Amino acid sequence: MNEAAEATLPRAGFWTLANVFTFARFALAPVCAVFFLQETYWGLWVGGWAGGLAMFTDVCDGYFARRQKQVSDLGKIFDPLADAVFFVMVWTALALAGAYPIWFALPFMVREFVQHVYIRPTASALGVVLAANLWGKLKTLVQTLVLIALCWLEFFIHYWPHIASWVKPLNMVLIGITGAVSVLSIIPYFGALRDARKAVK
């Protein structure tokens, strides 16, 4: 969407339907984490479904923001932040539950810290609100698919304990790939920040 098209959009209020879906993701993050930390098959099952619901809200907020013409700077800020909070909490909880070593969650933490504590605030100070780009959306998609896969694999161990010997290494491969995609996806945001700085000179 270009700047001229965005200028024609009506000013959206705070409690739009899209923003409600976004903030629901903040609420679901600790719910998923708590269930994953139970280290039980039922906790994994409930946490997995809660995670699926959280990712459904991610689809809904973008859909309704465009459909109701309520795309806002608030949404551009909080939508990716909700994704960041959700996945950092989920990956940390799964690591603490023993799905993979805790240090595998560090790339996600560092990546989101850099984006939401440095890149976005710096761009905002320059008068630019950075919306999620294609790479950011790809990162979220990959994380969603890997979360589903990890939940199913860990759940299967309850019924077939003998598969644990290869599920654990597979978990590490999947989360490693996801961490690499997550870290690489921040590179275009550095480019956007550079362009924002050039624009104000």
Image: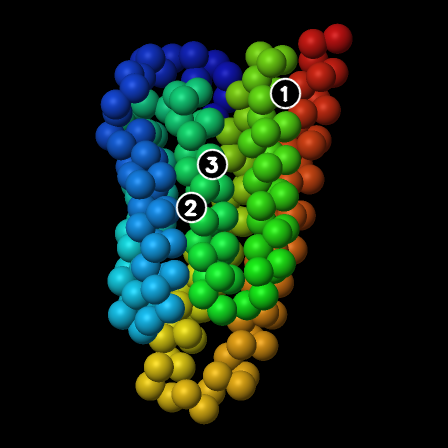
Secondary element under disc 3, as helix, strand or loop, is: helix
Mark 1 or mark 2: whose residue is earlier in sequence: 2
Q: Quadrant of the C terminus?
A: top right
Taking the spot 42% from the left edge, 75% from the top edge, the residue there is 153
Residue 125: x percent and y percent?
Answer: 60, 14
Q: Mark 3 points at which residue?
A: 80
Q: How crowded is mark 2: few (under 14 residues within 10 Å), some or many (20 or more)?
A: many
Query: Label 2 is placed on what type of residue?
Result: Phe
Taking the spot 45% from the left edge, 27% from the top edge, the residue there is 76
Q: Residue 86 carries which label?
A: 2
Cα separation, mark 3 vs mark 1, equals 16 Å
Taking the spot 63% from the left edge, 51% from the top edge, the residue there is 107
Residue 171: x percent and y percent?
Answer: 53, 71
Mark 3 or mark 1: whose residue is earlier in sequence: 3
Which of the pair 133/8 is nearer the observer? 133
Q: Name the residue under label 1.
A: 122
**Number of labelled discs?**
3
Is 2 located above or below residue 54 in the figure? above
